[in-house]
Amino acid sequence: MRLSGDELEVLSILEENHRIPVEDIALMVNSSVDDVNAVIKKLEDEKVIVSYPALIDWSKVAGKENIVAMIDVKVTPKRGVGFDEVAERIYRFPEVTSLYLMSGAYDLSITIEGKTMSEIARFVSEKLSTIDNVISTTTHFMLKKYKHDGVIFGENNERDRRMVVSP
Amino acid sequence: MMKEHKHYLAEMVKELKPSGIRKFFDLAASIKGVISLGVGEPDFVTPWSIREAAILSLEEGYTSYTANPGLLELRQEISSYLQKRFGVKYNPVDQVIVTVGASQAIDLSFRAILNPGDEVLIIEPAFVSYAPLVTLAGGKPVPVSTHPSNGFKLTPEQIENAITTKTKAILLCSPNNPTGTYLNKEELIKIAAVIEKHDLLVVSDEIYAELTYDEEYTSFSSLEGMYDRTILINGFSKGFAMTGWRLGFLAAPKPFTEQMVKILQYTTMCAPHMLQHGAIEALRNTYHEVESMRRSYRRRRNYIVQSLNNMGLDCYTPGGAFYVFPSIKKTGMTSEQFAEELLLAEKVAVVPGSAFGESGEGYVRCSYATSMEQLQEAVKRIKRFMDSLESKANRAQEVYSNN
């Protein structure tokens, strides 16, 4: 779907920070509040804007640290439905936070989050490997998150180093 | 016996006025928690791939001098950038010079063309260093005031009125610091006619060329008949967010650059070698970053212009740079008073327009090169400040009418 320049501007502003008031977006794109609301509504209806989650560094919250694993999965595609059917069986599990079909040495890339390592082990051995078309799985545990969705985690040392006033 | 030190100093240097923003800087720097709209440089850090290229060149040991006018490889990139972007052709071998900031390029230009007493027209409000650089080169800066009635755009009549038999050159800066005013092709053509008529040279400071928001940029040297009269000055500071690198460049007819290279050779030798490698990367691979920064500035410009107008500070929409120049005349304060009171009351720093020449009085320069969050907060604070002025005025009115 082709978007107008203004629609692209609104998207790009929201992608950076979706909590910015609509009134301010209207000022930024030289438009009216009603028009911006209409653009946002249209983009939501068309599922161009899928949702507005906050990016949270759970590792900073006591008792909420999650264990994250990425699993490479090889599967045999099924006639007629390809990978879609097995993919659906996998992404329906709520602990699966992302699922991609990949080119290369394996087929599906799963990201999964759990409370403990054994929770993830259980998912792999009891749920994932037992699915009919799954041939093999390789599980990688994530040790540290440096950057996620374009945002650098942890200390922000790119603070403003400029002088207060300059010509 | 030795006399006091001031007796040994050059008169010309002693007579230079310190920059008008110095005093204000000292005040602003002494206060904690200031939101600054007083900064004349991008809020972006230089794109990583440029920084990485400079780091790599240090690791590989590029620590020697380069040729006086800079690495040929960089001059070639500059030359093709100027042609691609502005349609002007300069030979990288002998028409392009890499300088220590655009400031040095301006300095070289004046030193190369001015004889004692030659006059240079400086369009005000103007960047603080133009006039002193003319003076230091032995020339005489002649201020030409522009007017808010047409958004501070320079008109041919204003130039005509300032020209004398001694006028040698004119310094153009579009988009302008501090007003953000941009001159489009039509307006420049009219100015070019006056330049031609009076046989003037043009030092064209195009450092904000990448930051125009409504119209395509026109380089002065691309205008018919102006190539031979123009010293084109540009650099990496604003468009590529590389202010601290101090890397600029100039392009001009060979008879000019030949002389300027001599001055460069005797004063600085060359721009830093490893940083020139960063600049090569900038021109080769990072133009998309320039575009994304431009989009970001444009949004913020729209936001601040309308916000200021909404709270009653008249502000035209400037076509470029990252400054807005609202009028504060209705407050009855001088621009210096306004800036100082705003700073003390609400901790927002703006620069008094008077720092940029007489015609800047009654205005303040607000730089929107700061994060959207900071801008939103600054707008809130300026609004509160304006409201407090208004209620003060209303109270005074009441007291007056009750008596």
Image: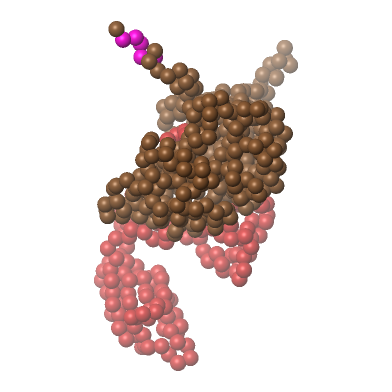
Residue A61 picture quarter: bottom left
Quarter of the image with the C terminus of chain B in it:
top right
Chain letter of the red region: A
Q: Position of residue A120 (x, y in %)?
A: 29, 72
Q: Position of residue A114 (x, y in %)?
A: 32, 67
Q: Was residue B120 drawn as part of the magenta stretch in this picture? A: no
Q: Main secondary structure of the magenta part?
A: loop
Q: In this picture, which residue range is highlighted in magenta?
A: B2-6
- Between residue B305 and residue A15, name the one nearer to us: B305
Colour option used: by chain
Report whether residue B42 is seen.
no
Chain letter of the brown region: B
Q: Position of residue B159 (x, y in %)?
A: 68, 33
At a point 45% along the width and 22% down the height, the residue shown is B13
Quarter of the image with the N terminus of chain B in it:
top left
Q: Position of residue B363 (x, y in %)?
A: 61, 30
Residue A99 picture quarter: bottom left
